Image: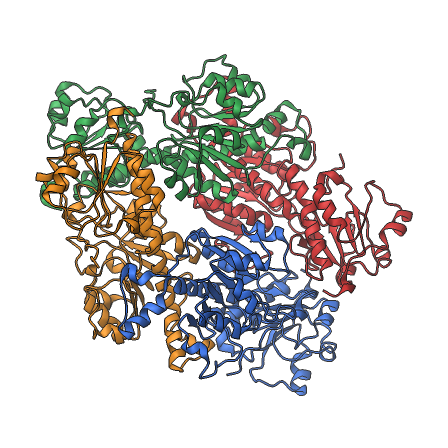
Chain colours: A orange, B blue, C red, D green
Amino acid sequence: MSPTRAIKRIFLAPHPRSLTEIFHPADLEHLRTLGELVIHEQADLDEDVFQKLVTPADIIIGQFDLPQSRLERIPQLKAIFNVEGNFLPNVDYQYCFRRGIRVLTISPVFANPVAELALGLAIDLGRGITRSDQDFRDGVEKYGLAANREVQSLFHQPVGFLGFGDLARALLPLLIPFRCRVRVYDPWLPLELIAEAGCEACSLDDVLRESRVIFVLASATAENRAFVGASQFAQMQPGTVFVLVSRAAVVDFDAMIQAAQSGHIRVATDVFPDEPLPAHHAARRTRDILLSAHKAGALEHALKRIGSIAVADVEMISRGLPPVMCKVAHPETVERFRGKPVAKS
Amino acid sequence: MSPTRAIKRIFLAPHPRSLTEIFHPADLEHLRTLGELVIHEQADLDEDVFQKLVTPADIIIGQFDLPQSRLERIPQLKAIFNVEGNFLPNVDYQYCFRRGIRVLTISPVFANPVAELALGLAIDLGRGITRSDQDFRDGVEKYGLAANREVQSLFHQPVGFLGFGDLARALLPLLIPFRCRVRVYDPWLPLELIAEAGCEACSLDDVLRESRVIFVLASATAENRAFVGASQFAQMQPGTVFVLVSRAAVVDFDAMIQAAQSGHIRVATDVFPDEPLPAHHAARRTRDILLSAHKAGALEHALKRIGSIAVADVEMISRGLPPVMCKVAHPETVERFRGKPVAKS
Amino acid sequence: MSPTRAIKRIFLAPHPRSLTEIFHPADLEHLRTLGELVIHEQADLDEDVFQKLVTPADIIIGQFDLPQSRLERIPQLKAIFNVEGNFLPNVDYQYCFRRGIRVLTISPVFANPVAELALGLAIDLGRGITRSDQDFRDGVEKYGLAANREVQSLFHQPVGFLGFGDLARALLPLLIPFRCRVRVYDPWLPLELIAEAGCEACSLDDVLRESRVIFVLASATAENRAFVGASQFAQMQPGTVFVLVSRAAVVDFDAMIQAAQSGHIRVATDVFPDEPLPAHHAARRTRDILLSAHKAGALEHALKRIGSIAVADVEMISRGLPPVMCKVAHPETVERFRGKPVAKS
Amino acid sequence: MSPTRAIKRIFLAPHPRSLTEIFHPADLEHLRTLGELVIHEQADLDEDVFQKLVTPADIIIGQFDLPQSRLERIPQLKAIFNVEGNFLPNVDYQYCFRRGIRVLTISPVFANPVAELALGLAIDLGRGITRSDQDFRDGVEKYGLAANREVQSLFHQPVGFLGFGDLARALLPLLIPFRCRVRVYDPWLPLELIAEAGCEACSLDDVLRESRVIFVLASATAENRAFVGASQFAQMQPGTVFVLVSRAAVVDFDAMIQAAQSGHIRVATDVFPDEPLPAHHAARRTRDILLSAHKAGALEHALKRIGSIAVADVEMISRGLPPVMCKVAHPETVERFRGKPVAKS
């Protein structure tokens, strides 16, 4: 906790998010007590701004370009906080690792909201909630047992997770009261870790074949593009509830739509290869597809927590301690992620 | 466990349910080992059948009329198992209590499925799942934060329970991971019991005013008809998520529809004063109402458990032990329930 | 809730406990609001007292003799609350059942404290806590790994429950974080109930042979006297942790002491065939026996809850509702219990 | 997952532990499949051994000296696994951070066993388990309520944690069923993190004054030497249960003994400033001190997991992925720890 650790300047550029979207006023006040705060709300950040405002910073909160040529001009830099939730190729990560600059993302704020929606989608599909409401509006509803043909409860159901990162670990406690056996496919993790969490590490094939409910929770990486494709859908049990909430890129979207259209499985998705989904896309007319408009994470309350956890970690750093709230970039994996930037609406 | 306790005859009349609906073959086989099993699948049960088949029974599983005049003719009767899930006025309960005849209902099989649907409805309304899907089909969906105006997560939300019976106790564990503070109004229970369950006993007014999500979980009784009416809806916070899964009779249904139509609250209901809901009922056209066609409990899997828990308790009785799986009728309350018979479709 | 249900007189005879031991002043005040309260603190209760004070009562809280001849003189009696925690042969139970008189016991207050001690004894024996402390006092302690020969952790250990009543259901949640597989032997319960609780119903032999930690949680009954005897101890795995917290009568105490003396198993007991344990009893000198002086339930705080739950249920009865806090006597089993009276110290 | 990442040589020097102590044969076999395995079991590791065996290694598992001068000679080194559980000053950590060499410790294997013992000690002290057993051996035991004077149950008790690292996070789930309110003092962590875990971040004074049970779970650092001293003990409530399981250095041991001797608090400790504790140390004769011989973590089963988690992480590294089972050293804190080496018995 030597005084030399103290932070002098914090440069905050919230774009593509807005300042009020991601900061409670109290968190912003807290941040001001930790160092001189310079806020840059515009989208573009030219050389002049960079030279004057960014080069004196110890801490950067923002998503603008930071190639080695720029990073070399900020020798005192301690940490870069990404405000989107994805590690994008805007930073020379390896340079940061060599220089001991922490690179962090605020993605943990999204884990609980996404997990909640994933559970809601799974119950909705399994129990036929949206379908029943639609039937009422069409005046064709049936009641009771007659309304429950093909319905499945989550209780005691075999569940499969594709991916076992933050999202999976937020979803897992929500499933515990349903006493599901959870099989996990995650090639980036050892069996031991999955077993310690009370789940079962399995091959992709085993997860696909043995589960009645499958949650896609994997980040997009250089290696897992469309890893759930037509042959994977074919392996699933008829009537499987398939819930996609992480990234559209990890599934073959067309194959998924087709698997639902054919009546083989039931699908809920919160993500799409292109947003908006084309106006005449088949998914809009397919009965066993539940469409959610990229709503899983971006709750007002969750966005406000971006500021809270970033400030908490800036304080840790200002006190000479490691950050603990945000997720740190790892040299082994950071460049393998293929997240999509937040749309600049 | 004296031999005199042994069961001689079990009379099983599944109507208005069907035999295969409520019995796994294995449970039926098990039942046959416990006494001579006589099955009567027809709806009506005339004097002749009663005299020949029912009067020799120790155990009755069924829902037909059992006034004192009939019960007096079955002096060896040990227990009556109701197969619907409601205590209806078909039995002279006080006679049964005086004679030590156990009256039981298989209602516990419905607790978990109903709790699951209640949670699904609450997440659906709070997060706007069905609404988002509808927007896609109408081609008017927005994405991300723009899609999440007025959305609320269940995490850390103040929750209210109206009624704290089996259903509430099945729902409670599903809410624990969401870390909600749960206020309970149940005039039939002491504060101590509610506190032991980790909840807070409150007045009806407090529950209405302090909760963001309200679950109606109370059975219909002689005393609670329409106890949630216009003035109760008026007390709720704007945007409250109101989930009705127990009995339509406990709310003023029209007032509830109006509270949703006015935009004051969001409503999901699985029960209706009349089923089917009239074809032109306003609820079918109101955006902030989620309609579920009495689907909460009547899952195939749950119905099959009726046989399982009834047989388990017949075995207990055959061994001179108290039944433990089904719910027993209490002399103080059994005649105050106002359940609706299962529709004879 | 008709006024005719209202309670007129409550007769309270706390002996063999004392009034201040089992009642918070606030609970006593609450009780006075429910009916005319007559308190009789003496041990004996002669005919004169009975005639004057007891015969007008609707509610009796106490443990004195209530044969049919006395009960017939209290025709308005609604409920008898036992204050010890055992159903003793002081009441003509069958008469009560015929007349609809509720007989209740306050035993649920003991479940949590006993479960806590049972867990503490199991960890103590398994990890060698008392033994280590004794070694320090004898100046012979070893450290670290050398101190941990023959030690066993509770994590992931196969556990056996003998008996699955209130006590077992209080202990079960304390074990959940240790992720033990729990096998249960309870001949009074169906497999379904045990499975619903997340445990496995087994034969006595299977529980004995497969468990590393065995908890004896069964009440003493007419049928289970010394059901864990020499041949049962012989079946246990070497080094089994055996924790007896319910009733000494259900084990062959001498066989248990011998099983520990021989080094075959480790034993902790909170109950004894005779209290005090004879001064020169071998158990006092045996290393692998942990002795606890009938301390499991009788905590001041637990005793005070006797009054709380009794008053809560008197209020329920006064309002025409069934009692829900105390445990009700069942006609099938109440006379089969063989509890020991509380010592009148 | 480029082939250049593949591991060539793994150098394994288990001293001061032994190879069979920390490796299941299967884990060792697994390790051999990940690279050429060189095992060095001797305590000393001279220049000759270093040059021949260590300099070609990609992975080092061991605790020997690795100053910059040696590290410079292993340019391909990817990771160093500490086998003791402490970060000691045997490594030039800053050099490792600059070069991207991962430094890891296997300390997570100890969290569960230590948490279990901490819970056992707390129940033992609170409920008087060892004391009761001692009374039996001295022939002075009392029974029942008389044995429970000054006893306290853990249920609903206010609990304090000093330190909120791995150990605290392993203890927390064990306390959940006891429904304790947990206050936490940890100056290295933000309030947000503690709140997310369901606890309350407090000042040291508040934890000391408000808790009935205090667990010392903090690692020893350069800054927290004896931070619980005489004035801190004085602030505690009379009868506080004080459980020390992390490091003796963080408390003023003499002040702690005195606080117990005076009857002010009850103490359990698994750690000592010097081991063995001097033969005539007052702690050996003080009634309200429970002594445990550094037994908390070093269970055979836990030690064997050292190999398991190290191998799992070596595999991650061999696949170009970040390690996830062991704990990584942070540049900010690694040199501030003041662990004690494992005694070379």
Task: Report whether C326 appears left or right of B42.
Answer: right
Residue at horizontal 52%, vertical 53%? C203
Q: Quadrant of the C terminus of chain C?
A: top right
Q: In the figure, B237 relative to D139: above or below?
A: below
Q: In the figure, B49 relative to B137: above or below?
A: below
Count of marks placed on residues:
0
Q: Position of residue C204 (x, y in %)?
A: 54, 50
Residue closest to the far right: C48
Q: Position of residue A78 (x, y in %)?
A: 21, 34
Task: Report whether B291 appears left or right of A255.
Answer: right
Task: Report whether A175 appears left or right of B5.
Answer: left
Which one is in front, B305 or B204? B204
Q: Quadrant of the N terminus of chain C?
A: bottom right
Residue at horizontal 74%, vertical 76%? B72
Q: Position of residue C202 (x, y in %)?
A: 51, 53
Residue at horizontal 29%, vertical 54%? A184
Q: Is residue B24 visible?
A: no
Which one is in front, A345 or A131? A345
Q: Is residue B292 visible?
A: yes
Dividing the picture into quadrants, the one containing residue C267 is top right
Which one is in front, C289 or B244? B244
Dividing the picture into quadrants, the one containing residue C3 is bottom right
Q: Position of residue D87 (x, y in %)?
A: 28, 27
Task: Report whether A182 appears left or right of D209.
Answer: left
Which one is in front, C191 or C172? C172
Q: In the figure, C60 relative to A258: above or below?
A: above
